[in-house]
Image (cartoon, rainbow, N blue to C red):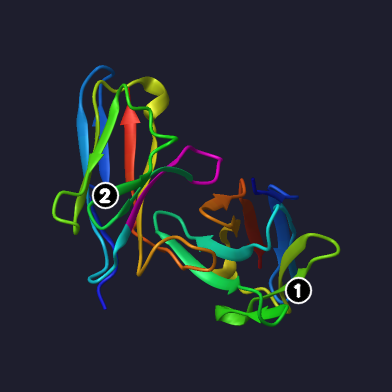
Amino acid sequence: EAGVAQSPRYKIIEKRQSVAFWCNPISGHATLYWYQQILGQGPKLLIQFQNNGVVDDSQLPKDRFSAERLKGVDSTLKIQPAKLEDSAVYLCASSLTSAGRGETQYFGPGTRLLVL
Amino acid sequence: AQSVTQLDSHVSVSEGTPVLLRCNYSSSYSPSLFWYVQHPNKGLQLLLKYTSAATLVKGINGFEAEFKKSETSFHLTKPSAHMSDAAEYFCVVSVNDMRFGAGTRLTVKP
């Protein structure tokens, strides 16, 4: 079974530029998550999709971050414009059903973003 | 609301000695608890999870964890460390969403 795919693996941009990340979840997984992992910290949920609908985006900085999952499969996360503090690893994860208690999430390798 | 505290940011052991990574949680409801491992430049991998069944949970690579409600703890253990165990370990509490601890970096000395 193929795992969660993410691209690119690494990205370096200058502040105020825009950037986009792509994620393809495990086939058949209804729920997709984007996390931000700042160096030295645990991952923090940015947004959760159930099929193509948003379940939770309470921690997404909506003035600069956006995400979509139009066909309920793959997803893109965009930052526009980027700030220095956006430097982090962006992790995508998927689960078979909704993130109820006990549901296992499967993670991709992440995209490491450096904003100069 | 739920939260998790990993009591050690860094643990160093010698190869062949026991590993103990400590995790305390806080939750208003009966939670699920997970341990994930993250090797350098790799994605997070599930080690084990507790979902209100047996309190002693066995995971992959010889790891296990015990859920202790009275102590609100979910410590991760392994009887004998291997060099390949060197990684970052995250304790996670889940009620409606997953809350990660800050992580514990495990170093294994030869």
Image quadrant for the C terminus of chain B? bottom right
How many numbered marks appear? 2
Q: What residue is at 64 percent from the left and 58 percent from the top? A: B106
Secondary-structure class at tag 1: loop
Q: Residue at x 22, y 71 (%)?
A: A27
Q: Is residue A87 above or below residue B81?
A: above
According to the picture, the residue beneath numbered tag 2 turns out to be A53
The alpha-carbon separation of the residues under discs 2 and 1 comes to 48 Å
Q: Is residue B27 above or below residue A89?
A: below
Q: Is residue B2 left or right of residue A57?
A: right
Is B49 in front, or is A52? A52
For the N terminus of chain B, the image quarter is: top right
Query: What crowding class fits label 2: few (fewer than 14 Cα within 10 Å), some (14-19), or many (20 or more)?
Result: some
- Locate residue B108 relative to residue A22 in the image: left or right: right
The answer to whether dots 2 and 1 both sit on one chain is no
User: Mark 2 against mark 1, which lies toward the viewer?
Assistant: 2
Which image quadrant is residue A99 in?
bottom left
**What's the residue at 68%, 72% (across, down)?**
B15
Residue type at tag 1: Thr
Q: Dot 1 corresponds to which residue?
A: B17
**Disc 1: host chain:** B
- Badge 1 crowding class, 10 Å Cα cut-off, few under 14, some 14 to 19, many 20 or more, is few
Residue B35: horizontal and vertical position, in percent?
59, 64
Answer left or right for A83 relative to B66.
left
Q: Secondary structure at mark 2?
A: strand
Q: Is residue A95 visible?
A: yes
Q: Chain of mark 2?
A: A
- Please state which of residues B62 and A82 is positioned toward the viewer in this rendering: A82
Q: Amino acid at mark 2?
A: Gly
Give the magenta range: A32-43
